[in-house]
Image (tube, helix red, strand yellow):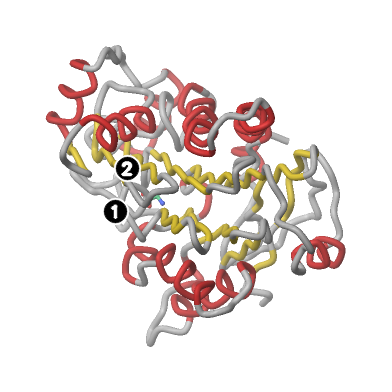
Amino acid sequence: MKRRNFLKKASVTGLGLVAVSSTLFSFKEKSEKKSMISPSKPIKPLVIATWDTPLAVETAAKVLEKGGSALDAVEQGCRIEEANENGQTVGKGGLPDRDGNVTLDACIMDEKGNYGAVLAVKNIKHVTSVARKVMEETPHVMLVGQGAEDFAVAKGFERENLLTEASKKAWEKWKETSKYKPIINIENHDTIGMLAIDNNGNISGACTTSGLAYKMAGRVGDSPIIGGGLFVDNEIGGAAATGLGEEVLKTVGSFLIVELMRQGKSPQEACEEAISRIVKKPNSDFRNFQVGYIAVNKQGEFGAYSIHEWFSYNLYKEGVNKNIKSDFFNKG
Ligand code: GLY
């Protein structure tokens, strides 16, 4: 089942789902937990990405298996989802804002702690690559809106209409009621966050999204913000987020996870603690939104955790690329 259809069937509050088999493989949580226990020697190369993203992870893994860098791997992996017009939460085909404009956010971090991001960009599909150009070819870390678009065009990126017929139709249907109060559920939160460890043991990460569907014009979430949607510290590890960006930002989720790993927590424990910070807030409305995290440490241990069921991630290690259902907080 495709990622989007799969998500459509999930109701955050009801969670009354018929068991759905994993898209690629079926794994028992227990056996996965075992594999998270400290490996004797670092596992590399490795790729982990949010959601059911086999092709993106395979593409990144191929870069690494040929001896390429983690930075090249995450960029190439994210580009797959940005070009996938059937995915309505990333790149071309993303659902638009309330005014019908598709605006994209992305960021990238390398093993040296460098960071680049673009925010609220129209008409350019491969925003992860633009973010990399910001990181490598400007004195800045973030470009926003028209400035980011003009920069991309100056660097040779093609302007194109990102609003596909399917997303236009969905937006027109939404406009019939235009209720906002946003519909906050996992269906329209499908950011791709990707972390990779290359053969040299270096870690990089990237994050790309069209953000919350039918957002207010100018709204930006966690994905392009350092420490929010993504953080990498090559001495420790990396983390990436998906879900309601406002909640990730308020807890600086990815930075928090890396700092918790620095203090000795495993990636799994760190992801669980970061979710706990969100759901245990006074008056937390967590039943009505989803957040999911992935993390990896320098040893190639990995973790994932979400508030609600049906978050999954793709993992490539030791030559195998598989989709794994994440453990989650809200077990009713
Ligand atoms: N996590 C993506 C967003 O909220 O924009």
Residue 274 shows in this picture: yes
Q: Against 28, is 124 above or below?
A: above
Identity of the residue drawn at 57% across and 57% down:
294
Mark 2 or mark 1, whichever is nearer to me: 2
**Quadrant housing the C terminus:** bottom right
In the image, taking residue 154 as reference, residue 190 lies left or right, namely right
SS for tag 2? loop
Residue at the location (35% across, 40% down)? Answer: 106
Instruction: Kindly identify the residue that appears in the image at 47 percent across and 49 percent down.
Output: 189
Which residue is at the front of the view, 175 or 165? Answer: 165
| Residue 310 position in % (x across, y down) | 66, 56
Let me know if residue 184 appears in the view.
Answer: no
Of callouts 2 and 1, the N-terminal one: 1
Q: Residue 205, labelled with which disc?
A: none
Q: Which mark is residue 214?
A: 2
Amino acid carrying mark 2 in the image:
Tyr
In the image as oriented, which residue stretches furthest toward the bottom?
282
Residue placed most toward the observer, 133 or 68: 68
**Label 2 to label 1: alpha-carbon separation:** 8 Å
Few, some or many residues within 10 Å of mark 1 (<14, 14–19, 20+): few
The spot of residue 228 in percent (x, y) is: 36, 59
Rendered position, 324 above or below 293:
above
Q: Is the CB of the residue bearing disc 1 within 8 angstroms of ligand 1?
A: no
x and y percentages locating residue 127 in the rendered image: 34, 30
Q: Could you tell me the amino acid type at mark 1?
A: Tyr
Quadrant of the frame with the N terminus: top right
Q: Which residue is mark 1?
A: 180
Query: Residue 35 falls in which quadrant of the image?
Result: bottom right
Residue at (76%, 42%) from the top-left corner? Answer: 322
Residues at marks 2 and 1 touching, judged by CB atoms closer than 8 Å: yes
Tag 1 secondary structure: loop
